[in-house]
Amino acid sequence: MKIDHIGYAVKKIEQAQSAFEKLGFRFEQPVEDRDRNIKIVFGEKDGYRLELVCPLDKKKPSPIDTYISNLGPTPYHICYQSEALEEEVRSLEKQGFKVIIEPIGAAAFGGRRVVFLMNLGLGLIEIVEL
């Protein structure tokens, strides 16, 4: 699988984006994923892609609440691309990964499915369907 991006949990997306722009990152337009209560913006520099993620509505739960409340702004997942999502998931499950968010269409990827898996030795990974 090829790496797509590194996910970075932040409290305020505009503040984080500004800091990364000072490091030379260029960003796309933000995307709101109301189903997951998150706002996302992708940035790129020298072939590396970042995904900044913040809660959309602080009064509702989001998948990054634990990360930002315990650690503050932090990288929290690596996302890989896959042309055979179900096959990759089955293979990773055999290797000790556990699906924690089932495959679902994601607004940030034009409705393509993503799945999140956890491994105690590695942490969280995301796979996006090509």
Image (spheres, grey):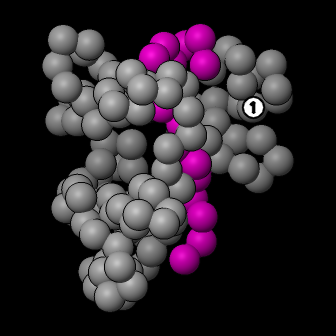
The amino acid beneath tag 1 is Phe
Dividing the picture into quarters, in which one does residue 25 lie?
top right
Give the quadrant of residue 107: top left
Query: Under tag 1, what secondary structure?
Result: loop
| Residue 113: percent from left, percent from top | 29, 60
Image: magenta residue range: 1-16
Q: Name the residue that disc number 1 marks.
A: 25
Q: Is residue 12 magenta?
A: yes
Q: Is residue 7 magenta?
A: yes
Residue 83 lies, in percent from the top left, at 42, 79
Q: Is residue 103 above or below residue 58?
A: below
Q: Camera-side residue: 85 or 119?
A: 119
Determine whether, in the image, residue 109 is placed left or right of residue 16.
left
Quadrant the N terminus occupies: bottom right
Q: Is residue 45 visible?
A: yes
Q: Closest to the observer: 50 or 77?
A: 77
84 displayed left or right of 17: left
User: In what quadrant of the picture does the C terminus appear?
Assistant: bottom left
* Residue located 45% across and 74% down the image: 82
Q: Position of residue 119 (x, y in %)?
A: 40, 66
Q: Where's residue 100, x and y in %? A: 24, 58
- On screen, residue 68 versus residue 63, left or right, reads right
Q: Seen in the image, is 58 located left or right of residue 31?
A: left
- Crowding at dot 1, Cα within 10 Å, few <14 / some 14-19 / many 20+, comes out as some
**Residue visible at 56% across and 40% down?**
75
The residue at the point 76 percent across, 52 percent down is 47
How many marks are shown on the rendered structure? Answer: 1
- Quarter of the view holding residue 53: top left
Q: Is residue 128 in view from this perspective? A: no
Taking depth in this image into account, of 121 and 113 the one nearest to the observer is 121
Residue drawn at (23%, 56%), measured in percent from left and top? Answer: 101
| Camera-side residue of 92 and 127 | 92
